[in-house]
Image: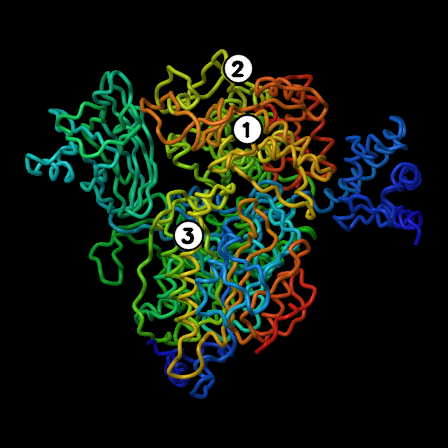
Amino acid sequence: MSWRHFVYAGLILCHTATRAHAADFKGFFERHCIECHDAGTKKGDFNIEALTWKTDDRQSLERWVGIFDKVDKQEMPPPKAKDRPDAATRDAFLAALRRELHSESAVRQQTDGRVVLRRLNRVEYENTLHDLLAIDLPLQHYLPEDAPSHGFDNVSEGLRLSMLHMGQFLEAADAAITAALDLRRQPEGVNRRFRYQDEESVTDDQKKPADKPKTFRILPDAVVIFDDNSPSTLRKFVFKTRGQYRIRISGYSFQAAGRPTWLKLYATDFKTRRLLGYFDMPSDGKREVEVVANIEQGELLELKPYDTNYNEKGLALYGHDAGTYPGRGIAIEWIHVEGPLVKSWPPPGVARLFGDLPVKPIENGKPGDRGRAFTIAVDDPLAAAEKTLQGFASRAFRRPVTSEDAARYVKLAKAAIDGGQTFEDAMRVAFRAVLTSPRFLFLEERPGKLDDWALASRLSYFLWSTCPDDELRSLAAQDVLRHPDTLHAQVERLLNSPKAAAFVENFTGQWLELRQIDFTQPDRKLYPEFDDILKAAMLGETKAFFAELLRDDLRLSNLIQSDFLMLNRCIAEHYGIEGVTGEAFHRMPLPAASHRGGVLAQASVLKVTANGTATSPVIRGAWVAKRLLGEPLPPPPADVPAFEPDTRGSTTIREQLAKHRSLTACARCHTRMDPPGFALENFDAIGGWRDRYRGKEGDSPKQQFRGRGIWEYKLGPAVDSTGEMPDGREFANIDDFKTLLLGREEQVVRNLTQNLLVYATGAGMQFADRAPVEEILARLKTKGGGLRTIVHEIVQSTVFQNK
Amino acid sequence: MSHFNTPLFPRRRFLQGVGVALALPLLDAFLPRARGASAATPGKKMVCICTSLGLHAPFLFPGETGPDYTPTPYLELLKEHRKDFTLFSGLSHPDQNGANGHTSEMTWLTSARFPGLGGFKNTVSFDQLAAEKIGLQTRFPSLVLGTGSPSLSYNRGGVMIPAESRPSHVFAKLFLDGTPAEVKQQVQKLREGRSIMDTVQDEARSFASRVGTADREKLDEYFTSVRELEQRLMQSEAWAQKPKAKIDAKPPRDITDGSDLIGRMQLLFDLIPLALQTDSTRLITIFLQGANAVPPVKGVTIDHHNLSHHGQQPDKIAQLRLIETEQFRVFSSLLARLNAKREQGAPLLDDTMVLFGSNLGNANSHDTRNLPILLAGGGFKLGRHVSFDAGKNMRLCNLFVSMLQQLGVETDAFGSSTGTLSGLVSA
């Protein structure tokens, strides 16, 4: 069959539905495309003769979108082609095709909605149950990890469901209800301060024979820890009950020559150790630090000084006597533990489940009470079940539930009561059913404009990753949420709440790939300065930076280059910036001559784009293209041998890549991909600045870090960070490169807007979404504004407010 | 020596225990079995093991093909089993360039293309396909194990089945019976689960009437999951009241050190013969994930992931070899145990296919072609190095089809297969 016939037939078939401009396309293809893309040649594996216009076939439509984009970006026909269309022809073709594709996509959005039924992902599931039941029990681990789709793990396409999920939803709901329905006697809380010198490891140390070196030094007011390998778990406190605790510690840095010292606080069960916080302890006075954290049953606290026992050559010191040791340490006065922090007893979860049913103490406990000290007192179990379940389901389903709707859950409770179960146990079965119901697990949205209840959920899951709170529910109940002013005020309220941290965490974690921070572990010899607090500081910086853009509505050009940095002492020292103290992040002006500023020069991003030993310009370049510019590159073609890293040092990565780029198959992408990576060569695998590569051979480094010398690695060849953009413009280093990149600010804004839209709605970008995105961009241009404005614009857009 | 000739549970007592209300699923295990060899090991079994950071090819693949190859350093470690395994070179799945260099982990047993890239949806792994056919005959349709939660097994919907990584839990699941009160409570929970599934299914039907066509497809996934769970709960209820197989082995003590890949691998491997000889399951997958941590192997000072990106540095390759040597030692001892003579019947290995390999052919460059693939046991004619074209690889799925057929699953295609694997014949 001839291609003309084929395309024509395809277009005609859907003619009535789409008013296809068959003739426009046919003529264009015939003149400009067919020479390379006929069935025989099918260059790039693209055969235009096999093209059909099938509105019910997503892949077919995506091929047309692909054509649109290639022609739009003037990648096709290629610059070298003889028959390139003139601008007018191209514009006419694009306009016609845009019209077809837009209307096709828009019709689909109207009938089905652009967001397919979306289930809560494991993060949202946990947050939702925490808020619904006023509990803090970890629940994520019950569920398999969700597969991201279109870059995010809250996109419905990737949120699959299986028997396994259902089984786990049953288990998790059981655990959550058990945590909420705690009718035992109130667990004995602690509220106790103890001196570190009473700690077992310290008293044991003091009992050592006089000729044995001591680990701790006893001061009148405190105990000094010098060695980060000394016994550090606090055995005085075994947490007998899981829950939230307030932990306070008083201390200071000792013999530190005026410098502060880090104190790290962990919770440990001897299998895993969790960093609860790190604190910058001053040397000119005492500091009292406080952290509120969830502690699991059986965990212990652990205190560690940081980088205290190294000499100026960088060698760790062992076996010194704490009594005479002249180096720096951390002096700890006391530790105060208070918790579990409960506002009332029985815990609020009981009322979240049972509403205002009376909770009564059990007078004379019987064995059948199973250790309960309270009971739900009901006269008429069935009536109580009806009332309770209708109320609970309304909150769990995030919209009002009628008594008929609730009847099926009541029936379940009734059957259990009839089967001889207690009221509480019977209700537990019904609660579990509510929490495994599709109306809880999925976000209920109907095609067309979202009603206020659905809008409240969409907004809440966007900015808080959890279910709507009372205020949103009340606005939805009054049917006023969708008013633009109300929505605006709610976005402000949600963004100003501490719960908006979930948005910063989950969005940047995926958009900037921060969740991959543990994907590789830096080589300890090459990067002795890398550790858990530097890692925490890296992530902290980028999240604080994004939060700052969001708070102050800063322009997105800041992502490329900013005149400020968000720093704490840890990350500042990593960047060689003096004069920053404390573990909290503060906004500081960008020091003159600093190469930092923007996300590209942030250690977190530089770390996730490197493996533990080496950096690859290819991976970093691909990151810039995909994450910042929104131009993902295709995977390498199957018939090209993979690039085999060789870090022995005889050839540089640049030489290896030059060889790679000389192959035409590779060149097309690598000329775009490698340059940003070259510009970033001055940043090592943990985001530190380098003029020379670290390795086994070369000169000994003269600089120090955190007051200690370096013996672990040598300095090898010098770094070359020059490069050339695909259009021929040259750059000498990262500063030049960022200047060139600033010319593409609009693309960065478009890309971030698209990413936000995907995240906000839980569906990938569709063709009909392009126009609204351009409208947002246009308004931003005329009215100004930055990240916060974009969030507002997205919430006010039709894309956000329709299913 | 463990006892695999577990006394069969009398059907009468089972009925007494459960009461008449319980619907009885058809469980082969309840049928009277003949004593003797076939009673101990009824049916073919399969174990699939993947180590995620590759196996250094120059130390593995010999220059010669056929039965008379000169052993390479790694094959030297398996020399006592030389007749019982075949090493394949030149096998892979097509189009495994994915979201990152390690995403082919998801598709080693599925062969789905472009793992993790936009719109990617995984497909069923071939062990789970087999589990659908032969899994109901055992207490556990399959055992999905790993050093962490990621596994090799994906269900029909392409959803990963999380791996069990604590050997003590697996052991308890397989061999330790609860107290009568615990069993009663477990049965109660299972029944509650079923009535909950009933209720939510009813809710889903009314929900479906309010949503659009596209949403209804998504709800179908919900319906299917609910129905499957109901069935599973019912089977579990029947199994819950049937005593588990009794063995002499002591429960293992879990290794909590996440970096101890070899130790954890050893403990997981120890479970294989126990699970198979008691016919608790016939299908096992094990995913060994190299960690970003230094494993406690003498002479190793750099973390495993880092070593796999050796960049041709001799000292890193030497350390990598130390780790992989340990892996081959543990694998060799597994083969030895499966091949041990038994009081009754043939060695387990005769009926057990053991697939060992990696999803990376060259971890240094994240190359997903020319995978190291080793097949032992299962009644094939083995003992050679079979080499396919290194440039244009043979489909790994062809091997999977051959293995499925050997398991008694009637199929002539799986994933990206083009047929069965030429040169692989039953002994």
Picture disc at residue B323: 3
Mark-to-mark CA distance, 3 and 1: 54 Å
From the viewer's perspective, is the residue at label 3 or at label 1 nearer? 3
Looking at the rendered structure, the kind of residue marked 2 is Asp
In the drawing, does residue B34 fall left or right of residue B382?
A: left
Q: Residue at x 46, y 46 (%)?
A: B317
Looking at the rendered structure, the kind of residue marked 1 is Val
Picture disc at residue B302: none
Query: Which residue is labeled 1 in the image?
Result: A491
Return the residue nearer the eye: A257 or B70. Answer: B70
**Residue B45 in the image, given as x and y percentages of width and height:** 50, 72
In the drawing, does residue A251 fall left or right of residue A651?
A: left
Where, quadrant-wise, is the C terminus of chain A in this rendering?
A: top right
Q: SS for tag 2?
A: loop
Return the residue nearer the eye: B32 or A527. Answer: A527
Mark-to-mark CA distance, 2 and 1: 27 Å
Q: How was this image coloured?
A: rainbow
To the question of a shared chain for discs 2 and 1, the answer is: yes
Query: Are the residues tagged 3 and 1 within 8 Å (C-beta)?
Result: no
Q: SS for tag 1?
A: helix
From the viewer's perspective, is the residue at label 3 or at label 2 nearer? 3
From the viewer's perspective, is the residue at label 2 or at label 1 nearer? 2
**Residue A550 in the image, given as x and y percentages of width and height:** 53, 24
Q: From where the camera sits, is residue A756 visible?
A: no
Q: Residue at x 11, y 40 (%)?
A: A204
**Residue A720 in the image, given as x and y percentages of width and height:** 56, 23
Looking at the rendered structure, the kind of residue marked 3 is Ile
Mark-to-mark CA distance, 3 and 2: 48 Å
Chain to which the residue tagged by mark 3 belongs: B
**Residue A759 in the image, given as x and y percentages of width and height:** 59, 37
Query: Which residue is labeled 2 in the image?
Result: A563
Query: Are the residues tagged 2 and 1 within 8 Å (C-beta)?
Result: no
